[in-house]
C-alpha cells in the first residue's frame, strides 16, 4: 500500500553539473528568485521553510520559483513534517560556475571585489 502520509511529491533536484549556463542565468535573472537566493545565502542551511520568505507573490508562484531554482541546481529542498526546508547549493554551484553567485549576490551599486 502506498504511503499517503504526505500530500505532495518529493522535490526533484538537478545537480549543478547538469545545468547549462543559460539555465543558471535565467533562474538568477528574475527579481523574486534573486531575492530568495540572497536570503538563503545569508542564512544557515535548512533554516528557511518556503513560507518564511517575504516575497510579493502567492503560494503557486512561489512554488514555481522554487521549481526553477531547483532545476537550475541552486536550491535543494527537503520535507520536515508539514514544512519544506531549503538550502542554497553554494558549494556545488560554485564548483560548476565559479564566481557567478559572488557576482549576483553582490549588492547593487557595489564595485568589483578588491
Image (cartoon, rainbow, N blue to C red):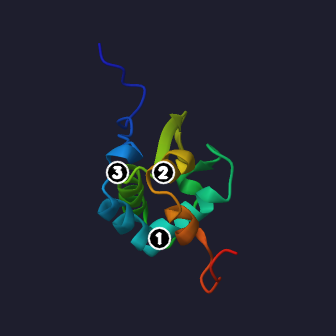
Q: Residue at x 53, y 70 (%)?
A: 104
Q: Position of residue 64 (x, y in %)?
A: 35, 58
Question: Crowdedness of circle 1 by 10 Å Cα count: few (<14), some, many (20+)?
Answer: some
Number of the label disc, if any, that sits on residue 93? 2
Which quarter of the image is occupied by the C terminus? bottom right
Q: Mark 2–mark 1 contact, CB under 8 Å?
A: no
Check whether the beta carbons of the residues at disc 3 and disc 1 lie within 8 A of each other: no
Q: Position of residue 8 (x, y in %)?
A: 37, 38
Which sits in the foreground, 28 or 55?
Answer: 28
Q: Is residue 96 above or below residue 109?
A: above
C-alpha gap between disc 2 and disc 3: 12 Å
Q: Quadrant of residue 61?
A: bottom left
Q: Earlier in the sequence, mark 3 or mark 1?
A: 1
Residue 71's label in the rendered image is 3
Q: Nearer the viewer, mark 2 or mark 1?
A: 2
Q: Earlier in the sequence, mark 2 or mark 1?
A: 1
Residue drawn at point x = 35 percent, y = 40 percent: 12
Tell me the number on the disc at residue 32.
1
Rate crowding at label 2 as few (under 14), some (14 to 19) or many (20 or more) other CA atoms within 10 Å: many
Task: Choose the circle earlier in sequence order: 2 or 3.
Answer: 3
- Considering every residue shown, the one lying at the far top of the view is 1
Distance from disc 3 to disc 1, alpha carbons, whole Å, reads 16 Å
| Residue toward you, 15 or 12 | 15
Q: In percent of the image, x 55 and y 33: which residue is there?
A: 81
For the N terminus, the image quarter is top left
Using the image, determine if residue 64 lies above or below residue 76.
below
Q: Secondary structure at mark 1?
A: helix
Amino acid at each position: 500500500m502506498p504511503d499517503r502520509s504526505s500530500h505532495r511529491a518529493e522535490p526533484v533536484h538537478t545537480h549543478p553539473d547538469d545545468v547549462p549556463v543559460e539555465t543558471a542565468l535565467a533562474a538568477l535573472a528574475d527579481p523574486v528568485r534573486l531575492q530568495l537566493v540572497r536570503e538563503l545565502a545569508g542564512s544557515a542551511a535548512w533554516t528557511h521553510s518556503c513560507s518564511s520568505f517575504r516575497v510579493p507573490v502567492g503560494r503557486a508562484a512561489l512554488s514555481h520559483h522554487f521549481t526553477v531554482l531547483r532545476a537550475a541546481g541552486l536550491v535543494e529542498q527537503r520535507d520536515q513534517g508539514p514544512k519544506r526546508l531549503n538550502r542554497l547549493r553554494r558549494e556545488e554551484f560554485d564548483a560548476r560556475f565559479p564566481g557567478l553567485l559572488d557576482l549576483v549576490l553582490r549588492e547593487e551599486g557595489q564595485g568589483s571585489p578588491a
